[in-house]
Image (cartoon, helix red, strand yellow):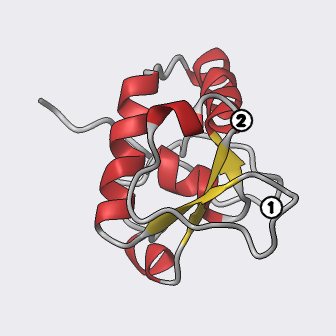
Amino acid sequence: MFTLDTIRDHYMTIGHIEQRRDALANRCGVNISRDEIMQALRELIERGHAKAYDLDTTVWPPKGYDGMPPLEDIKPWGAYFWVTEEGPEFHNASDSWWPFEDSDDDELRLRKDWTPPEE
């Protein structure tokens, strides 16, 4: 959900996603690895909730990838990710399992009433 929320309102590269991840780790102690982000992006793309595009600004419209781009095209600023129309239907911030409050400033703040699921 962190990855989906990160690309929900903005075109984001892996570098941008990692910056938000680092801020989340500093504020809340939540650690997410690059591998987990990449896996989440892969799943979102496979399900049709996100799409990847080439970041080459000399070509318009941007080239969309069919599926997940090759790793050499992604790191760290080579491709960007964007939520498709189906993505927001999947993301519903009011669900009880979603740990963050809605905010207009793109900051991720843990809800006061949220408790992590037991394993």
User: In the picture, residue 70 is in which quadrant?
Assistant: top left
Q: Which residue is the extreme one toward the front? A: 59
Residue at the location (46% across, 19% down)? 31
Q: Is residue 7 above or below residue 83?
A: above
Are circles 1 and 2 on residues that touch, CB within 8 Å?
no
Give the residue at x 73% y 58%: 103
- Where residue 52 appears, as percent x and y from the top left, is 54, 59
Q: Along the polypeptide, which appears first: circle 1 or circle 2? A: 2
In front: label 1 or label 2: 2
Viewer-proximal residue among 93 and 53? 53
Residue at image mark 2: 77
> Residue 90: x, y in percent?
38, 73
Residue under the point 42% across and 70% down:
49
Please tell me which residue lies in front, 53 or 89. Answer: 53
Report the side of 99 relative to 13 (left or right). Answer: left
Q: Quadrant of residue 14?
A: top right
Q: Where does the image place residue 100, in percent across and percent down from the top left?
A: 54, 49
Q: Secondary structure at mark 2?
A: loop
Q: Quadrant of the C terminus?
A: top left
Task: Categorize mark 1 by other alpha carbons within 10 Å: few (<14), some (14-19), many (20+).
Answer: few
Query: Label 1, label 2: how many angstroms apart (C-alpha)?
Result: 25 Å
For badge 1, the amino acid type reads: Asp
Residue 96 visible (yes or no): no
Name the one closer to the observer, 45 or 54: 54
Seen in the image, is 54 located left or right of residue 5?
right
| Residue 104 tag number | 1
Quick check: 16 above or below 3? above
Task: Give the residue type that dot 2 points to.
Answer: Trp
In the current view of this chain or complex, which residue is farthest to the right? 58
Q: Secondary structure at mark 1?
A: loop
**Residue 73 visible to the viewer:** yes
